[in-house]
Amino acid sequence: MFPGFAPENSPDGIALLTRSFQSLVKNITDQERLFTCRVESIKAKQQELAARYQETQLLARRLQEIASLNEILFNTSDERELYLRVVNFLHKLYPRAIIRFLGTTKSHTKMCILADYGSPDSDQRMERCVKNPLDCLAIKRCRPVVFLHPDDHVFCCELSDLAGEYGYLCMPLIADGSAFGCINIIIKREDMPENGPPLLENDFKLLDLLTTHTALAINNNRLIKTVRREALTDRLTGLPNRRYAQEALQNEISRCARYNSVFSLALVDIDLFKTVNDNFGHDEGDRILTLLAEAAGKCLRKVDMTARYGGEEFLIILPQTEIENACLVIERFRKTFNQLTLSGTLEAKNITLSAGLSEFPTDGEDAPALIKVADDRLYMAKRAGRNRMIWNNKI
């Protein structure tokens, strides 16, 4: 027997064995509990990683979809189609939400719905924000307005009546530092998840990316149209220039050839225009050119086209008009212009016009032929004493 140790069958020995056994059981229990906790922790982390992986995969898909949409938007020339594509894309993301694409008018004095999905026709509360852009908090601040929970602090006064029934998100469309519209996402509270936010952080990132790309696409579209319009417009008169006239003439020839139709064109020239410039100055000549554009606006239909073809020469295209009727139109146009030069503030008075007309397909089936016939007849009118029109090679 070792000193300090009680015999196994003694009371002290039994107590010692009991304590040792209890300690061993406790250690095993603690280890088991620790192991169980670690297993639960690993499971939780696995679930978290799986959820994050799914979120990442979803985000990657959404980013790919936005990239594809972005490519389409930047290659869409029709703005209306662009609005609809964005609204349809958002509807797929949030099928239960009301989606509205709002934009300012050209005068920036009113907001209007450019495209929407799911807007209730009978709910006038949603129309309150379609008023003055200055009343739109998202446009005024150039920042998103998020009101998805009743305790959110930033809310739009124009949509305050919706607060109890709906949550909403307004994403401004910004280009060159100013907002020109916004995208509304309005969600019924009953359609929001009971636990957790109705929109995740990634949703906001995606929406911010989408609105940024959409605004850039719209701005790019408008810039291209502005540049093209300026490239095809005569700055002095505001009329289409020679390049635009040539395109329009070719388009009209193609259209009439396809539908077996007719049209007439006229080459119109201001008589003695060089003399006016020499005697009264080029500013006076510019005023006369501007008066001719004004006369065209008074006499011609919207479908007719008047272009400054070169110097003091103008080309007029009259769709679906036979040459006999075109003569009546051009004669009225000549008289209106002459009256404007008499009643206006011009120093040079009683300015007249000469014109030569041709008809498709009688006088030619392509642009050069039609222009040549009209130009020859214009020259005949000049030689015959000016202030007249010729349409049939007879003076």
Image (tube, helix red, strand yellow):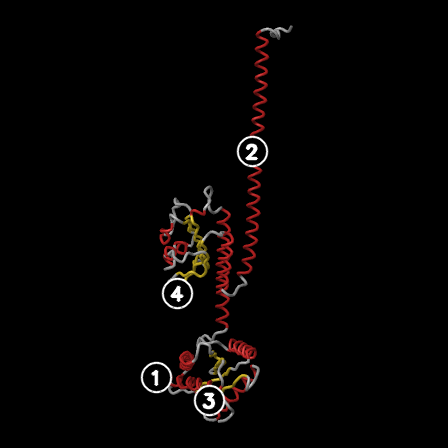
How far apart are the alpha carbons under marks 2 and 4? 61 Å
x and y percentages locating residue 66 in the rendered image: 54, 55
Residue bearing the label numbered 4: 107
- Please give left or right for residue 124 compared with residue 216 in the image: left
Disc 2: which residue: 41
Which residue matches tag 3? 389
Q: Nearer the viewer, residue 337 or 332?
A: 332
What's the amino acid at mark 4? Ser
Decide if residue 211 is on the left or right side of residue 54. left
State the quadrant of the N terminus.
Answer: top right
Q: Residue lying furthest right in this view?
A: 1
- Residue plotted at (44% across, 76% down): 302
* Disc 2 residue type (three-letter): Ser
Task: Please give the name of the residue rendered at 45% of the width and 74% of the height, measured from the top-left corner.
Answer: 235
Q: Image point 52% across, 92% down: which residue?
A: 393
Q: Is residue 237 above or below residue 38?
A: below
Mark 1 or 4, closer to the camera:
4
81 versus 375 height, above or below? above
Mark in front: 2 vs 4: 2
Q: What is the spatial separation of the Cα atoms under label 2 and label 1, in whole angstroms?
A: 93 Å
Give me the C-alpha separation between circle 1 and circle 3.
23 Å
Foreground: disc 3 or disc 2: 2
Give the Cα distance between marks 1 and 4. 33 Å
Q: Amino acid at mark 3?
A: Met
